[in-house]
Image (cartoon, rainbow, N blue to C red):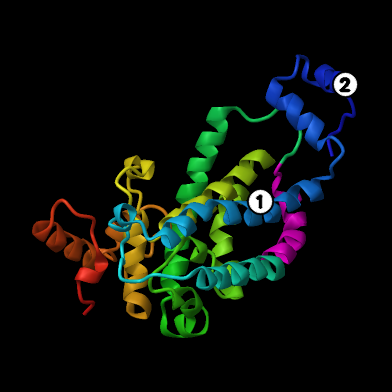
Amino acid sequence: MLPYETLEESKNVLGRDLTLGETLWFNYSVKKSEFVLHGHNTLFLCIFYSIATIPFILIELSGHKKLNKYKIQPSVTRSFWEMFKCYKNVMWTFIVTVGPLQIISYPTIKWIGIRTGLPLPSGWEMFWQLLVYFVIEDYTNYWLHRLLHCKWAFENIHRVHHEYKTPLGLSAPYAHWAEILILGFPAFLGPALVPGHILTYWLWFILRQLEAIETHSGYDFPWNPTKYIPFYGGSAYHDYHHYVGGRSQGNFASVFTYCDYIYGTDKGYRYKKRMYEKISPTNTFNVQNYKVD
């Protein structure tokens, strides 16, 4: 809850008029406790997961030929009920795992200093903090994901996520509850090391979820704006990881590709992609054209 109860009082504290964004934030948050604001993350997780996957669901169900040519594994199709089953399982995991985790982690949020008051962060402050969060999460996630491909961890935990050898946007957070907790740690580490405003905190988890949905979409559209992000992995990159499945010892990165390149865990993917581009330089890389050794 904000330490002031009126707009006039907040102006006096800041020594200036509030911006439009600050006024909107004041009106929204003034009567809400920090615990309630922190709990918004679970709400946003469910909302954006439900909304952001709709375009990919519609594309999958339409079977449109012009769009299907951008499908990375075009021989695999799924019905509405198959996708709904995935959605139902993911939402259940959110409720029984993420919801309680949000409640338990609240004291930690208070301790590290995620603030909810005024002034709001500038656009540049949010940009640089989000960039730091992505880099920290990507590096930490790389190693934890790689550990999850060890024999015991894969068979007991990570194999659930790999039930989808052909991923779809809905399957991005489809995983064992223990994996949700394990890979949730890298996502939380950035805000813990570089705490900011809760709006940045919310935006970080929303963007990370949208990125995961896009990466698991199963489609590689040439007009996707993420193709202009340096070192960004993308859907074809991660699709190959799922296609190889339990034997996969590469393409572990969650967002960028530099860790796989530095540690040599993308050699198989790069080799097969080069071979495909020599044969068919104008078409989208289709992992099903190559037998996995």
Q: Mark 2, residues whose alpha carbon is within 10 Å: few (<14), some, or many (≥20)?
A: few
Q: Is residue 250 magenta?
A: no
The answer to whether 24 is drawn above or below residue 67 in the figure is above
- Residue at screen point 68% across, 29% down: 120
Q: Which stretch did the figure color magenta?
A: 98-114
| Measured Cα–Cα span from mark 1 to mark 2 | 30 Å
- Residue at screen point 75% across, 53% down: 39
Q: Position of residue 280 (x, y in %)?
A: 12, 57
- Residue at screen point 58% across, 52% down: 51
Q: Amino acid at mark 2?
A: Glu
- Which quarter of the figure has residue 288? bottom left
Residue furthest to the right in view is 5
Please give the residue where the numbered disc 1 appears in the rendered image.
Answer: 44
Please give the residue where the numbered disc 2 appears in the rendered image.
Answer: 9
Does dot 2 land on a helix, a strand or a loop?
helix
Q: Amino acid at mark 1?
A: Phe
Chief secondary structure of the magenta portion:
helix
